[in-house]
Image: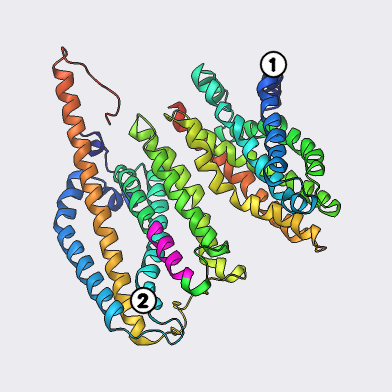
Amino acid sequence: MTALLRRELRLALRHGSDTLAALLFFVLAASLFPLAIGPAPETLGRVAPGVVFVCALLAAILPLDRLFGAELEDGSLDQLLLFGLPAPLLALVKAGGHWLVTGLPLLLAAAPTAVMLRIAPEALPALLAALLPATLLLSLLGTVGAAVVLGARRGGVLLPLLVLPLATPVLIFGVGAAEAAASGLSPRPHLLFLAAMLAAALPLCPLAAGAALRSAAE
Amino acid sequence: MDASAAVAPPAGGGRNLHRFANPGRFLRLSGKVLPWLAAAGVLLTAAGLVWGLVFAPADWQQGDAVRIMYIHVPTAWLASAGYAALALCSLASLVWRHPLADLAAAEIGPVGAAATGLCLATGSLWGKPMWGAWWVWDARLTSVLVLFFLYLGHIALVRAFDDPQRGARAGAILALVGAVDLPIIKFSVEWWNTLHQPATITLTGAPTMYLGMLWPLFLSALGMSFGFVAIVVARTRAAVMERRIRALLAARARDEPQHETSPAGVA
């Protein structure tokens, strides 16, 4: 498993520009909002948590269609499945790799981006605390989506259509945490909800993704 | 010729399930039931709607706008029930490799999406005079909208593969993942403080509704449910026959090698 994870990371390093593209997309998309709705600090600060979350959501989906795509094409997916590792574990490793390569950099870039968007200072810690489970959840859900569309004709277009509706609860509670903190309430219930969703998704998503992988490799 | 007919029936408890997996038996049985289903659907829906739209009393507060309920509530219930049926078919297809469940799941999708779309549209028409807005972002409306997108995603996914078997498998996994939305829809009006009212009719308590309005609602809900089932059965019959024709055409193409053969899509 560690060998697999190391392989994932090495592949991501070798294709550095692909990896950075998601991050760049996130920063660029977020910086479009001040230009679109005007730079007034009070309006910008109000929408900042939502903008950061939506951009992170879209950026996390961006590299998903290559998550298994290249390996299906060159046949290494069959090799990986023959390894003896159960398919759900393989999916879990893939989700972990996606988080380390996309989710973690997004989390790091979120703080400066949110500050640039003039977020309320008391909302920033809550936003980052919500982004940690949220990016993990997005990696897990995204792995399911990527595994399910494997081999489909317009997989890249289909993928956001499938993942975005499933990701709406993540968005709602994530932004809810930041909004609560901004208005002086405790973000704790929202964060607990996110943690509960993560606890449910951690075993279930790899199972679903594993089943999809096995049927794709048949 | 028809690969799905060649599935050997397993011994034990699964036998009853697999008796109906035989497409030929399904076609014979459904052919007998379908006219009755369709007639019951049309008659009951017509009776419920005429009663509800013409004869039932107007609401003391909402006036005649309450009559939208006779369409809105049945379609809302069908949207959820349709997705539950979709999830059950997906489970049967994944666990027992039930060949008819694949076809039925693919055919429930568009019908359920239509019901969900109708539910959202009628709700929006009612919301404008009552709430003063076509749309509000409360939990019930949002979760039904997500259900609509789940239906659309399922429809697109099932039809996106060259191999229908693969499409059915992928769609089944997606449908089961999406089933988490159902309890959220059901309980959204209780968990959150929503503009949409909580349930009026429950299984355990007495309905808090005038009987002269409840009966037409009940009739149209029953009629639309029959209609839903009839449409799904008719579509599934068409899908079974379509698959047979494909298999026949492919078999003929194999026998005449000078023609271009297309092996893709043959079960």
In the displayed structure image, the side of residue B267 where residue B256 appears, left or right: left
Left or right: where B40 falls relative to A50: left
- The front one of B174 and B133 is B133
Residue for badge 2: B67
Give the alpha-carbon distance from disc 2 to disc 1, as whole Å. 63 Å
Q: Amino acid at mark 1?
A: Arg
Spot the residue most to the right.
A121
Instruction: Tell whether B262 sits left or right of A188.
Output: left
The answer to whether A156 appears left or right of B240 in the picture is right
**Mark 2 is on which residue type?**
Arg
Residue B65, percent from left and from top: 40, 76
State the residue position of label 1: A14
For the residue pair A84 and A134, the one nearer the viewer reads as: A134
The answer for which chain carries disc 1 is: A
Q: How is the image coloured?
A: rainbow
Q: Quadrant of the N terminus of chain B?
A: top left
Would residue B127 be counted in the magenta stretch? yes
B164 w.r.t. B89: above or below: above
Q: Which residues are magenta?
A: B116-128
Q: Is residue B105 shown to the viewer in this render? A: yes
In terms of image quadrants, where is residue B222?
bottom left
Give the residue at x 22% y 18%: B261
Task: Write the residue at 29% across / 66% down.
Answer: B224
